[in-house]
Amino acid sequence: MSTFKAPKGTYDLIPPVGAKYLAVREAIAAPLRGAGYGYVETPGFENTELFARGVGESTDIVTKEMYAFETKGGDRLALRPEGTASVLRAALEANLHKAGNLPVKLWYSGSYYRYERPQKGRYRHFSQVGAEAIGAEDPALDAELIILADQAYRSLGLRDFRILLNSLGDRECRPVYRTALQDFLRGLDLDEDTLRRAEINPLRVLDDKRESVQKQLTGAPLLRDYLCDACKAYHEEVRELVTAAGVAFEDDPRLVRGLDYYTRTTFEFVHDGLGSQSAVGGGGRYDGLSEMIGGPALPSVGWALGVDRTVLALEAEGVELELPATTSVFAVPLGDEARRVLFAKVTELRKNGVAADFSYGGKGLKAAMKAANRSGARYALVLGERDLAEGVVQLKDMESGEQTAVGVNEIVAELESRLG
């Protein structure tokens, strides 16, 4: 028994659960690949200042939840708490925006880290698939990303999720709303930390999940009442495009995102079967982030969908994914010569795209057939001395129990035919 355990708030993915996570990642990525998004992968840690500037220095993520450390060389680094700032940094560093083909469309998949109180659906290490469209201000891009996420979830069989949609305004209209909201919040009975947050970024107070705070927010001014004409028109076009695509959404005038970089379109995917951790993904437009981290003006939009939470949503709906069999054929050799012959056939099957496994360790027939059963293989190949002399292999259908003698040289073609 190992004396080591996974750190608190983390988890290991082991078979068969790991296959479910892989299937979810693939399903989310598939629509993105079909829409011109290229894969990007960034380091698991970045300069701490990247997140302080991008995510927001006063956010809980940066002040309380980020795993930050100093290297022996004196560099201040942090494990990435989210993906957007890293992906934008990578795109800027590689000058992708100068290639003349905007927007730069990227998708990514990876692990992220936040120091939080662990609970179901909220971990200190979690997995996301994300997408970013960098360098274009176009309502069609915002709509495209919402539609692609909806397509991904529906391809998995999810039905009971909701899409919440709002606009956060821009540099012209949000400051006016910010002042009105601050005036409202100053009149409430809030603790010192929340009042301090209200002075730095009052929108984040609207995102406070505590009931004591939410009760007092009744009657708070709504951003939609302060949107400038340009933001109103932009948001209306996003709504029209999403509606025309047959994707249902709910207007949520109180929806804000917990990160400083969002502007205009903001959206969230929620699943009511997950309890308090109902958000399974979210995103929006972040037109000023590039400038915040030292780049040129690059209006952009993106989202991140939680793999962990998506798996929980599938379980809440009772959706069973159709996962490919890890093994289709299991080979059982009886004797050294049979071992050599069958191992060669297993290798040939694998080269031809057939998932095949082998009875290792010199097991007897009974133990080897138990292993074949546990593998989930549809067929077992059994080869003994008498079969060798006759030049055949016993092909056993593990579902029906039917057993057929097939020529050693014909077995690969026979299995390919049967497995389709």
Image (tube, rainbow, N blue to C red):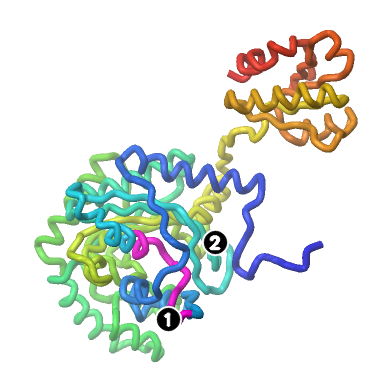
Q: Quadrant of the C terminus?
A: top right
What secondary structure is marked by label 2? Answer: loop
Residue at the image point whose x is 44% and y is 38% from the top: 155
Circle on res. 97: none
Q: Which residue is mark 2?
A: 121
Q: Kindly identify the amino acid type of the residue bearing the numbered disc 2.
A: Gly
Is residue 74 or residue 148 the one in the foreground?
74
What secondary structure is marked by label 1? Answer: helix
Placement of 380 over or under 15, stated as above or below: above
Q: Which residue is mark 1?
A: 63
Placement of 296 over or under 176, stated as above or below: above
Q: Closer to the observer: label 2 or label 1?
A: 1
Magenta segment: 73-87
In this image, 177 relative to 144: left or right? left
The image quarter containing residue 259 is: bottom left
Q: Quadrant of the N terminus?
A: bottom right
Q: Kindly identify the amino acid type of the residue bearing the numbered disc 1.
A: Thr
Give neighbour class at mark 2: few <14, some 14-19, many 20+ (Cα, 10 Å): many
In this image, 15 relative to 127: left or right? right
Give neighbour class at mark 1: few <14, some 14-19, many 20+ (Cα, 10 Å): few
In this image, 84 relative to 179: left or right? right
In this image, 377 relative to 261: left or right? right
